[in-house]
Structures are given as C-alpha cells and as structure tokens.
Image (cartoon, rainbow, N blue to C red):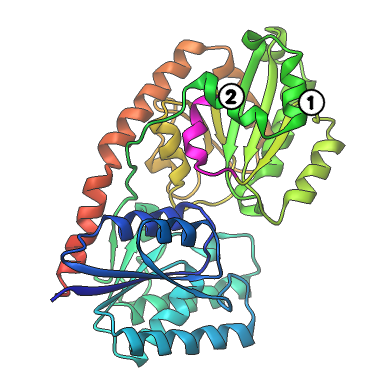
Amino acid sequence: MKTKILYIITKSNWGGAQRYVYDLATSLSKDLYDVEVVVGGNGPLADKLTAAGITVTSLPTLGRDLKVKDDWKAFCDLIRIFRQKRPTIIHLNSSKIGIIGSIAGRITRVPQIVFTAHGWAFNENRSFASKLVLKVLYWQTMMFSHVTIAVSEYMKKSVMNWPFMNSRITVIYNGIRVAPLISKANARHELTRTNAALATTIANIPANKIFWIGTVAELHPIKGHDVALRAIKQLVANDSKISKSGKHIIYTILGDGEERERLASLVNDLGLSQHVFFLGRTENAWQYMKAFDLFLLASRSEALAYVLLEAGLATIPCVATAVGGIPEIIDDMKSGVLIQPEKPSEIAYAIDFLATHEHVRREYATALHKKALEQFNFEISTQKTFELYNRFK
C-alpha cells in the first residue's frame, strides 16, 4: 500500500521554499508514495507541479499576512482536506502553514507531521512583543509536529535552548540539482531583451567594459536591496578602482514584490538609472546565472539562501551578508566574500576588490562550485528526507 503524503506551503510563488517542495514532491517514487500538494492561492509552483503530474489543491484564503477571517477559513479547509484525503504524512513548509497546519493535523490525528523551518520570522526587524509571540507560536508548531527539519545549523541553534527541542529537530541541508545553464553570451542577450532601458544602455558600451552584477531575490525588505543600491552608488560616485579601470557597472535584480515601487524611487534618487535595472520575476532565473560577473546578496536575514547554491553551480563569485546559514555555504575569503548586513561601504569595498582581481574571482567561484556539489548534493539531501519519512511507515 502506498504512503500518502501531503506537502503544504503558504505561498505558490517561486522561491527557495517552493523549489524545496517541488523537488521533494517530484522526486518521490510513484510506486511507493501517493503525493499531493496544497498551496496558498495560485502561482508558478502550482503550475510547475501540475505540469509534472502532481495533484495540486489551492486554498485562496491561505496567505502570508495575518487575516483572522481568512486564516480561520484556511484552517477549516485544512481539517476538511485531512479528513477527506487521510494522509499518512503531512509535510508543512513556512511559518503560517506550520502554525495552523500542525494544529489541524493533530485534531484530525494525522499519523506523522513534519515541519520544515525555512526561516525564523523572529529574526526579522520586529518589536520585542512581536518576536516573543512568534517564538511562542514556533514552539507550539514544533511541539505539535513529530519532527522539525532545519535547513541549516544556524536554524537549529537558534531554538536549541527552547524546552523539549533537543530530540525534535534535525538538520537537512537543501540540495542543488545539477542542470544545464545558458551560456554567458546567451544569458546576457536574453536578459537584455526583457528590459528596454537595459538594452539601450548596454548598446552604447563595449562588451569588455561592462561589469555585470546580479541579484535574484524577492523585492522584500528582508533582502536588503536598499543597502545594495547604496553600495552601487558608492562604487559609481567614488574614486573606486573599478571606475578607474573604465568599467561600467550594470546591476540587475531578478524578482518582484512589495518593494518594487520604493526601490525604483530610490534608484532615481541615487541617480542610478544607467546602472540599476529591475527585470521582474524571471522564469527559471537560475539558468541565467552565467550572465553575471558577480552575484550579490545583501540580505538582512536568511535561513540558508538557496540562490547562493545556484550561483555556486554556475561558478559565479559571490558577495553576501554573514547572516543566518549563509556562512555555512560561503567560507569567507575562500569561496566568496562575507560582509556585515546594513553596511553599503563593505559591499562596495568587496565588489571593488573582486572586480579588479579576476584570478581571485575565479578561485572563489571554483571553490564555491565544489562545495555546492559536495556538501549540498541533491541526492543526499532528498535521501535523508525520505529516510525520515520511512521512520513513520
């Protein structure tokens, strides 16, 4: 008899957590498991899963923001779904669904509840009271779940001093799938086609005079895009080595979100319209990684930052903030450069150094590529998760 698994995630956009769900759901043996996915709303994740032959149930009322009426409706819908589908395992992903899903799972007596923590919201910039409430809710989620998967050692250490957590949480790193990438020239060509202003700017600059920096991330305050923009301003305005070399900095941000308008306004205020370009949500953005000479991630908080593994797979040097699980991916001054959050000057200095030391860029990128393949191996990661499921049979 097949084991029935329900994966549940709050949002159906395409980010690290969504890729995680997609990878697991599409990797399980169809001979051994009956897999379905429940998502909040509609979006790329639901589309990709459906195309892969996975049954998807959408809950329109399930969303990231706190809305009592909608959240209650989503909770009731989950109870109905659990009673109807009678899963052996529910695998919860993200904070909101972890809280309501674990309670619904206990009420309906789901045999095994797995919760993957992709990030701790109490590490974000919030009031003391808000952080305290979130910690209580996370503790409740992990107590109602039979096991919690942390995607980094940092995630686990953040809660290890909480009551009864020692035996309830295990670390399984996200794994990166090896897949073909678009060549540098073709990637740049395809990305340039998506933005008229970028195409016009690049058309007037010799190819060997462009230093292309890239970011792939949701336009959300936690990603620190505003800090990155101020760093680019320093590189353009100051007497930097990269400026002296005659290079023109192009900084493209692939992703969309609530900060789009504010960040676009900041670009104009900083006078960076010839340097910074928003390319919006880009399908399979990882395929275009080779377009970049350098990858930048200025996050204020991260659980692991799957996108850095994608940069590593593409053998692209990285500058990233030393927050959350990022130092578990990047070894400072060995496989990339780590900087402190909220420090535009540190970002500018790191970029300036790498931009003018090509051999160091190659060395760091090669080291990151090797680490991504060896320590964040997709087959090993999924196998560890499936072994966790097998404990519940």
Confirm whether the magenta stretch covers residue 289: yes
Dot 2 or dot 1: first in sequence order is 2
Q: Quick check: can you spot residue 211?
A: yes
Is 346 placed above or below 109 here?
Answer: above
Residues shaded magenta: 282-291
Is 348 placed above or below 243 here?
Answer: below
Q: Which residue is mark 1?
A: 274
- Percent of width and height locating residue 232: 71, 29
> Image point 37% across, 42% down: which residue?
328
The residues tagged by marks 2 and 1 sit, at their Cα atoms, a distance apart of 17 Å
The image quadrant of residue 311 is top left
Q: Amino acid at mark 1?
A: Gln
The image quadrant of residue 91 is bottom left
Quadrant where the N terminus sits is bottom left
Left or right: where 229 falls relative to 174: right
Seen from this angle, which residue lies furthest bottom? 107
> Image point 57% across, 70% down: which residue?
131
| Image disc number at residue 188 | 2
